[in-house]
Amino acid sequence: MPPSRGVKKQKEDKSNCRVLANRYRVEKKLGSGNFGTAFLVFDLKAGKEEEEWKVLKEIACGDLAPDETVDAMHEAKLLSKLHHPNIVKFYDSFLDGEFFCIITEYCEVL
């Protein structure tokens, strides 16, 4: 089910939207901090409707010190090993140009 706040499935042309890894269409910026920017993305290859909406955390590797880059990759590795109903689900991580990207489940704020 799509997020009820601010993002809906639309039938408009999405050809000019940014798509990462030939899979994740960026819909809107959720926020940013010292370690990166989070975006709401639509998973074009999701198998289940409830898994269509995800969060992409984009970390600019060029802005990080070498130890911070290692920390970001370590975060992704740790997330991939965690499986608990109270922990955000990890889906994927990849490099996109100068950005390290982490894909997690979208948890709507109630």
Image (cartoon, rainbow, N blue to C red):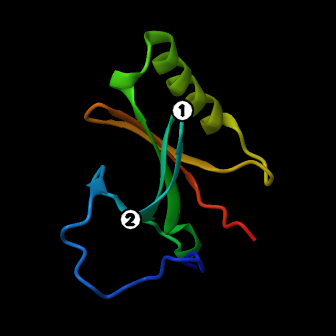
Q: Which residue is mark 2?
A: 45
Q: Position of residue 19 (x, y in %)?
A: 28, 58
Determine which quarter of the picture holds residue 50: bottom right
Residue found at x 39% / y 37%: 94
Tell me the crowding category of disc 2: few under 14, some 14 to 19, or many 20 or more residues within 10 angstroms, Cα based: few
Indicate the quadrant containing the C terminus: top left, top right, bottom left or bottom right: bottom right
Mark 1 surroundings: few (<14), some (14-19) or many (≥20) residues within 10 A: few
Specify whether 83 is left or right of 14: right
Of tags 2 and 1, the one toward the viewer is: 1
Report if the CB atoms under discs 2 and 1 are less than 8 Å apart: no
Badge 1 element: loop
Which label is found at residue 83?
A: none
Disc ID at residue 34: 1
Location of residue 20 in the rendering, given as x and y in whole percent from the top left corner: 30, 52
Residue 65, position as x, y percentages in the image: 44, 13
Which residue is at 57% across, 23% downward? 74
> What's the residue type where badge 1 is placed?
Asn
Badge 2 element: loop
**Measured Cα–Cα span from mark 2 to mark 1:** 30 Å
Front residue of 101 and 30: 30
Q: Residue at x 71, y 66 (%)?
A: 109
Sooner in the amino-acid sequence: mark 2 or mark 1: 1
Indicate whether 103 appears above or below 62.
below
Say whether residue 11 is left or right of residue 53: left
Amino acid type for the residue under numbered disc 2: Lys
The quarter of the picture where residue 71 lies is: top right
Identify whether 72 is placed above or below 102.
above
Q: Quadrant of the N terminus?
A: bottom right
Residue 92 lies, in percent from the top left, at: 48, 44
